[in-house]
Amino acid sequence: MPSQTPDSLPACDESVRTRLVRAADEEMQIQGTTAVTMAAVAERAGVSRATAFRQLGNTPRMIILVGIHRARNHIARTREIIAAQRDIFAKMEEVLVYTTRELPEDPVIRALVAQRSAAVLDEDIRSLTDEITGPVLLAGQAAGVVRTDIPIREMIDFLLEQTYLAAEYPDRSEKTARHRFRTFVAPALRPQPAAHTAAGTPGHPNAELEQALSAAADAIATARDAAVRIRCRLDGIDERFGDL
């Protein structure tokens, strides 16, 4: 049976792709993410450059694939964090704190984060985040604590975007990560107030309070005007009695 040459390997062969990703990972450890070349990766993997390009695409795509490969090392820890928390939002908050602290320590993942716009839409990254975050969001919806008016996919994209922003932020402390989650992330994921269904129907939980305060302010203004008129009348009466 004739031996296969690098160019005869099928482009869809996942074992070839896996080998290339590992080779790219090794090259990036030596050369960094900016100096690595597809030729060096192909040589290390024992395939042709044409095969490397077919399997990995271009350099930015290669960085994403290696970043995912490295991120998988954090999946076990992420699952432990999720399992340790009972509250749905506590699960997501602790994961954000962990990923904000740990992921940017890896130079390849930092390079992946720098490609945020492309990475958010990458199907392999989406698949990875679906695997971790999807069940948590679905459980939150079933419990009535996560909104159901937008697709799970869009909420996962939002969480991924927030993870990238937190990882790029100069202050990656636990305090700052928790502030981001509690101030911006959690409120966006909770069930939202119902929209106006008819004219005059309040669309905000505080609408009734606001209406009551407005009515009270109007009443105070009316009473103030009445008091001024009464005072003016009393002053006129005093003047007339003074002339007697």
Image: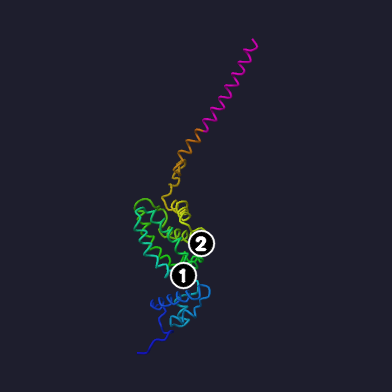
- Tell me residue 205's x, y (percent): 44, 43
Give the numbered dot on residue 212. Answer: none
Rendering coords of residue 237 (x, y %): 60, 16
**Quarter assignment of residue 83:** bottom left
What x and y, as percent, mark residue 42?
A: 46, 80
Q: Quadrant of residue 138?
A: bottom left
Q: Judge the density around disc 2: few (<14), some (14-19), many (≥20) Cα neighbours within 10 Å.
A: some
In this view, 177 is above or below 104: above
Note whether 20 is above or below 176 in the view shown.
Answer: below
Check the image and report above or below for 207 versus 43. above
From the top left corner, tell me how far across and down residue 149 is, in percent: 41, 53
Seen from the viewer's position, the closer of residues 128 and 123 is: 128
Write the start and end of the magenta stretch as one range: 217-244
Give me the residue at 34% from left, 57% from top.
84
Q: Which residue is mark 2?
A: 168
For badge 1, the amino acid type reads Ile
Kindly give the residue lying farthest to the top in the view shown. Answer: 244
Secondary structure of the residue carrying numbered label 1: helix
Q: Which residue lies at the image location 59% right of the left edge and 18% below the top edge?
A: 234
| Residue in view at x 45 percent, y 67 percent | 122
Along the polypeptide, which appears first: circle 2 or circle 1?
A: 1
Q: Residues within 10 Å of mark 1 (few under 14, many from 20)?
A: many
Residue 243 lies in the magenta stretch: yes
Mark 2 or 1: the one toward you: 2
- For label 1, the residue is 64
Quadrant showing the C terminus = top right
